[in-house]
Image (tube, coloured by chain):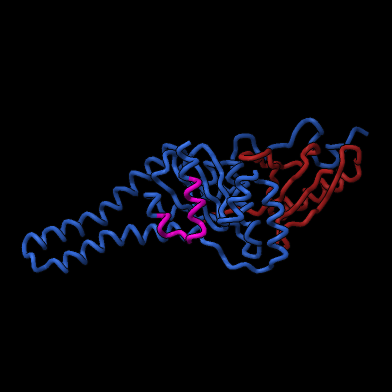
Amino acid sequence: MTAHGASAAGGARPGGGAAPAEPGAGLPERSAVAWRRPVDAGALRARERLWTLSTAAYSVPFVATAGILVGVEPGLAPIAALSLAHAWGIPELHANRGAKVVRPRRRRDEAAEATALGLLGDLLGHEARELHARTGLVLERARLGVWLVGEAGALLVRPGGRRAHCWCVRVEDPSLPSADRIAHLLLALREDETGFATVANLAFSGATWRVRRRLPEAMRPALAAAVQASRA
Amino acid sequence: MARLVRMDRTGHTTLAEWTGADDAAFAAASAAFREQLEAGYYAVVSEGEGQARQVTALPADAPLVILRRPIAGG
């Protein structure tokens, strides 16, 4: 018998490499959201424009209102200030929703966490492993930009570092340890970046500095590293 | 020694191990592999930093095959 008797065993023949699921099919989870346009660089740029427009649509009326109030009656300055606070606060609320996607969840089983961390560590280089140990986020360079992968979502820092996209995406098994949840997302991202972004739900797209303000302090060095990597 | 591991609530579980010279071990690993795919897992071979590939047949020459659950937008 040849080594492994592959056909009988249902395995791939040695030297022939692994059998891909369907060549070019990408992430299998894409079939669950088949109606979505694949999120490639062009689609991302379109979303960026849309988010900028919607932010302006929320904020500009409040700024204009403040200007009109002060122009008509300077005594209405306190009301104008409230209006400006709304103009500032609404994008901040959106950024807060975006930053939430990577906030850490409650740990359950420390032994399982340690085991999962070992596997995740095997998937990472030294630099990414060290950053994860400090911040809880895994930095991954890809075509669309630099990703920071968390337990239930990922941030994408676009080339240049000025804009970040916050994606809500998770593995459908809440019993998994934190590092395993990250490993799930990381492997899916590495399989098919466009598919990953297509399956994920966009929670926020906007200025990186807005996201940074809303991240837990321990995670901010990861964002700084992603911004730096996106400029390299 | 190549390994087939499943990410689960324990961190991960090694379901099978095999070597290039052990047909029986590879056949057992392939059977375990198919069983997990039928249970809804996806199999991924890590190909170094930044690269991974989904597989539907157990690759004999991969040192590590990881079984993962589907992901979805939250």
Instruction: Estimate the x, y position of residue A95 in percent, counting from the top left.
Output: 39, 57
Residue plotted at (47% across, 39% down): A40
Tell me if residue A74 comes above or below residue B54 in the rendering: below
What is chain A's hue in the picture? blue
Instruction: Estimate the x, y position of residue B59 in percent, counting from the top left.
Output: 77, 39
| Residue A212 lies within the magenta run | yes
Instruction: Name the image quarter holding the N terminus of chain A.
Output: top right
What is chain B's hue in the picture? red
Image label count: 0
| Residue A67 lies within the magenta run | no
Front-most of residues B50 and A7: B50
- Residue at the far right in the pictured view: A1
Front-most of residues B71 and A94: A94
- Residue at the far top in the pictured view: A15
Q: Which stretch appears magenta? A: A211-226
Residue plotted at (19% across, 65% down): A81
- Residue at the far left in the pictured view: A72
Q: Specify whether residue A15 is in view.
A: yes
Tell me if residue A228 comes above or below residue A67 in the rendering: above
Q: Is residue A9 left or right of residue A53?
A: right
Q: Is residue A86 left or right of residue A93?
A: left
Residue plotted at (50% across, 41% down): A229
Q: Chief secondary structure of the magenta span?
A: helix
Instruction: Estimate the x, y position of residue A30 in percent, counting from the top left.
Output: 55, 46
Q: Is residue B31 left or right of residue B8?
A: right
Q: Specify whether residue A38 is in view.
A: no
Instruction: Estimate the x, y position of residue B64 in percent, counting from the top left.
Output: 76, 44
Front-most of residues A199 and B61: B61
Tell me if residue A65 comes above or below residue A207 in the rendering: below
